């Protein structure tokens, strides 16, 4: 019977140990991973990373927060923020010491994406072999929206990458006396949680892997000869005592070490980077994500459910994933580790399929296990075709492969083309007028905060992040927005040119004058700022 290797667990006949090591951690996987990362880097080179355009839905918020932090304003106490501070801290430090342009923060996200791809590759390699690992990673790169997220100054991938790396370390790392894999995984998971609290979603998966790695079921499959006491334990009290000691030593201790490493690392990062009041941070995050909606001026979270049609649009992955789920379920009894991609997919679908609001960039959390299951499906169908020598199945796989490759290629091309066609902020004529008034203004207000970063003029700290979640939580309302604008009176207002009624229209009519208008923007200058700029030009 041909052997299908799942790394920690095996089916069928054993192969020589040397060959298994070569298959999983030798030169061939290293070459394949290097080629995949090389293709990813080439795709990144096609994107205008150094150009002043907005990539990603929330890039403007992260850049606006970093701009305020560069001006020495503090998160949480002065700048509203519903996430941990590590990502904003890293972006701020890069802008301050390495690259004042947007290129530096985008390269940071690209680096985290490379870590994510490597972690996914190694995890699937360890469990299912090189063929599945290569397909999983390549499929992930071609997933909807992945290229956009991979270079956007957003928290999603920087938070996901260390969480998946922690899972990969537990799957790949050897069991040692000092439990170094569990400790390192705890550190990585702490980094993920300091990026974004969404990493909590993966704790049940961590617990499952730790159980399979050290628990009774896992040990019985890994080393059946080393576990006589567990069989004897059902016959008498002595065996039962040994079983309890085994659970305490081999299950509870690794879990405790992981949790301890996670907690200590989380606190250490918090102390090293600061980030304001931790209680205030938790309050803002809880209210934004879990508190019931208090304000409905801009709808409610219920207006943004999970878009299940994305699974149909991504048929090139969903169809083979269905086969992969079936193949994995058939192997669970003989190899419990086959549960990992299944539980991963079920967990992300359960969480993100029910949580509201759902944003399109959350799909990356579903994409990782979905691509893994799809690769398992293709590998299983390929093996079945080889065993049965079925011409019909081979022809069907070939047709599907060509169609799927064409679909994925078109999707990648359209993503790259869409990003490259984004409006070039640096060439916007309105910036000429903004630069003219920049020396005379402390703050600007804009409903497109990416302009704050690219002009270097900060938003009012309390208005640095104006998101729907902030309105829903009741932290901000139209009345409070108007009051804050009245208190700060920004020197410049850059407003999208549409018919929407603004909460502070009275302030605009009383103290501002329209100085520029085009199809996209209306630029207002505060009257005293315009007078000061006029006097300055007259004196030159």
Image (cartoon, rainbow, N blue to C red):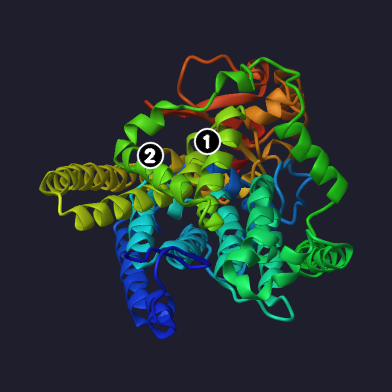
Q: Confirm whether residue 537 shows in the render.
A: no
Front-most of residues 175 and 160: 175
Q: Which residue is mark 2?
A: 322
Q: Residue at x 58, y 34 (%)?
A: 350
Image coords of residue 226 (percent x, y): 66, 75
Q: Which quadrant of the figure has residue 326?
A: top left
Q: Which residue is mark 1?
A: 448
Q: Mark 2 or 1 closer to N-term? A: 2
Which secondary structure, mark 1? Answer: loop
Q: Residue at x 33, y 78 (%)?
A: 28
Image coords of residue 494 (percent x, y): 53, 33
Q: In the rendered image of this protein, does residue 342 appear above or below residue 483? A: below
Q: Is residue 203 left or right of residue 426?
A: right
Q: Residue at x 33, y 57 (%)?
A: 135
Callout 2: few (<14), some (14-19), or many (20+) C-alpha neighbours within 10 Å? some
Q: Residue at x 67, y 35 (%)?
A: 490
Image coords of residue 123 (percent x, y): 49, 63
Q: Quadrant of the N terminus?
A: bottom left
Q: In the rendered image of this protein, does residue 154 appear above or below residue 251? A: above
Which secondary structure, mark 2? Answer: helix
Callout 1: few (<14), some (14-19), or many (20+) C-alpha neighbours within 10 Å? some
Q: Is residue 55 left or right of residue 527?
A: left
Q: Label 2, label 1: how many angstroms apart (C-alpha)? A: 41 Å
Q: Mark 2 near mark 1, Cβ–Cβ under 8 Å?
A: no
Q: Which quadrant of the figure has residue 264?
A: bottom right
Front-most of residues 440 and 523: 523
Label 2 or label 1, whichever lies nearer to me, is 2
Front-most of residues 218 and 456: 218
Image coords of residue 99 (percent x, y): 52, 67
């Amino acid at each position: 019977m041909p052997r299908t290797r799942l790394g920690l667990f095996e089916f069928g006949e054993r192969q020589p140990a040397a060959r298994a090591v070569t298959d999983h951690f030798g030169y061939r996987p290293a070459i394949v991973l290097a080629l995949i990362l090389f293709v990813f880097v080439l795709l990144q080179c096609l994107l205008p990373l150094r150009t002043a355009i907005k990539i990603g839905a929330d890039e403007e918020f992260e850049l606006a927060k970093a701009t305020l932090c560069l001006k020495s304003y503090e998160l949480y106490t002065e700048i509203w923020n519903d996430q941990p501070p590590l990502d904003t801290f890293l972006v701020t430090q890069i802008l301050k010491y390495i690259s004042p342009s947007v290129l530096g923060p985008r390269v940071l996200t690209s680096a985290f994406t490379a870590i994510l791809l490597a972690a996914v590759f190694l995890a699937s390699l360890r469990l299912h072999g090189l063929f599945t690992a290569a397909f999983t990673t390549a499929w992930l790169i071609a997933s909807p929206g992945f290229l956009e997220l991979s270079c956007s100054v957003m928290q999603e991938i920087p938070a996901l990458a260390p969480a998946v790396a922690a899972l990969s370390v537990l799957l790949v790392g050897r069991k040692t006396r000092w439990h170094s894999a569990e400790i390192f995984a705890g550190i990585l998971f702490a980094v993920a949680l300091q990026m974004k609290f969404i990493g909590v979603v993966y704790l049940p998966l961590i617990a499952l892997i730790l159980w399979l790695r050290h628990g009774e079921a896992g040990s019985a499959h890994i080393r059946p000869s080393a576990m006589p006491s567990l069989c004897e334990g059902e016959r008498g009290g002595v065996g039962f005592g040994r079983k309890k000691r085994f659970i305490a030593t081999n299950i509870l201790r690794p879990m405790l070490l992981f949790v301890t490493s996670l907690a200590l690392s989380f606190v250490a990062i918090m102390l090293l980077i600061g980030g304001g009041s931790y209680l205030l941070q938790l309050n803002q995050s809880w209210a934004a994500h879990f508190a019931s909606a208090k304000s409905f001026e801009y709808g409610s979270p219920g207006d943004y459910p999970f878009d299940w049609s994305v699974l149909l649009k991504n048929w090139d992955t969903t169809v083979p994933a269905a086969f992969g789920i079936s193949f994995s379920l058939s192997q669970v009894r003989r190899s419990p580790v086959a549960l990992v991609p299944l539980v991963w997919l079920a967990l992300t679908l359960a969480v993100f399929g029910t949580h509201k609001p759902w944003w399109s960039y959350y799909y990356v959390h579903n994409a990782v296990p979905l691509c893994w299951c799809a690769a398992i499906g293709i590998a299983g169908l390929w093996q079945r075709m080889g065993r049965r020598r079925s011409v019909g199945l081979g022809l069907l796989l070939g047709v599907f492969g060509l169609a799927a490759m064409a679909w994925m290629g078109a999707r990648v091309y359209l993503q790259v083309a869409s990003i490259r066609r984004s409006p070039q902020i640096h060439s916007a004529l309105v910036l000429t007028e903004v630069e003219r008034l920049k020396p005379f203004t402390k703050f600007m207000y804009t409903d497109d905060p990416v302009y704050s970063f690219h002009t270097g003029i900060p938003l009012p700290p309390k208005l640095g992040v104006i998101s729907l979640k902030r309105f829903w939580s009741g932290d901000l309302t139209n009345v409070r927005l108007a009051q804050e604008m009245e208190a700060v009176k920004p020197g410049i207002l850059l407003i999208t040119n549409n018919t929407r009624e603004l909460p502070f229209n009275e302030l605009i009519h009383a103290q501002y004058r329209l100085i520029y208008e085009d199809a996209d923007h209306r630029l207002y200058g505060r009257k005293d700022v315009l007078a000061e700029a006029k006097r300055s030009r007259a004196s030159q």
